[in-house]
Image: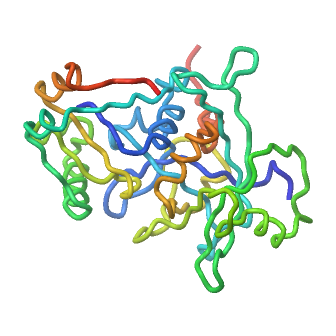
Amino acid sequence: MGYYTQSSKSNALTWALRNPRSRTTACILELNIDNTAYNKLKIRILDDKSASKLRQQIRASGMTKTYRANVDVLTGPLQSDPSVEQQKFESPASQALLNSPLTRRNVI
Amino acid sequence: MKLDGIPYIHFMVEVGHGKNRGLIAACEACDSNDAPSQGGCFAVPIKKDDQFFPVYRFDFSIYKGNGTFVEVDGKRSTWTGLAISVALEKGAPEHIVLASLASIPGEDLTNVPRSLLQSFLKVNGEGLDWPVFRKMPRRLPLPYIGQLDHPDFNGRLRELQLIDPRSLDKFLDTFGIALIGCEHEGTLVKLEMVDA
């Protein structure tokens, strides 16, 4: 559970176009978050190795759709393409930041 | 080789773990309890010797920005492009290059010289930086384990990675080209009998 973002806008748009829930409304939402506010959040950064290990644990436990890391933001390589960075905002604090004036939200 | 017989570049998601790992189409992922919630990669069917097929096709749309696309009759238009597999340097592993963005229905591609296509690309010259894919490092071919019925899903598939991770973003910025993969794979769902 959480709000997912990623560093590749082309990958994000393709994902939206292939998702039956969003294929007719696909667009790219660009988020520019204030660095100071972002760094106040509890952030867990995963590298390739730790992301792979966590992924296996989550899959083995059947918690793919429900797992929470008990942080504000979990960030690491996109499973399907490690060259893309993905962020998962999973706490009320991170949600508040995304919806605050400290985050510029533009459909591009 | 007719367009209808050319395998697709697909947009897919890896699911499962251990010996049960496999790929499903991204259009299936949102309903899968095993799939990650966001993101995928392009993948292609391969020959039995793990080599790429000579030519692949892909569907794309033109993104105009602000959630709008080039439309025909009020619907987002989709075109079919072609990609070829080439060795960009002598002795190098094969790569897949997006080569043509024109739809060529029924065109016989057998007689198109590979050298002509490669010179047209000018990958290392002054031409356009065409997106170039390679096999995803440290990944083995995977089977398709979803529920769709598509001829490309009968054998194993290779996940792809862009050599320049930003090249598709640049393509999107410059031309508005949004790669879809195979637009119609999701319409080929196996039919099941139900009680009337």
Residue B76 as seen in the image, left or right of residue B148: right
**Percent of width and height locating residue B78:** 70, 33
Picture residue at 25% right of the left edge, 26% below the top: A103
Residue farthest front in this picture: B126
**Percent of width and height locating residue B174:** 60, 42
Tell me where residue B185 sits by quadrant.
Answer: top right
Picture residue at 62% right of the left edge, 77% below the top: B49
Picture residue at 48% right of the left edge, 51% below the top: B41
Tell me where residue B128 sits by quadrant.
Answer: bottom right
Residue B177 as seen in the image, left or right of residue A9: right
**Percent of width and height locating residue B59:** 67, 41
Picture residue at 23% right of the left edge, 20% below the top: A99
Q: Is residue B160 above or below residue B66?
A: below
Q: Is residue B81 above or below residue A18?
A: below
Residue B152 as seen in the image, left or right of residue B15: right
Q: Quadrant of the N terminus of chain A?
A: top left
Instruction: Residue B159: tell me if it is visible.
Output: no
Residue B155 as seen in the image, left or right of residue B118: left
Q: Is residue B108 above or below residue B36?
A: below
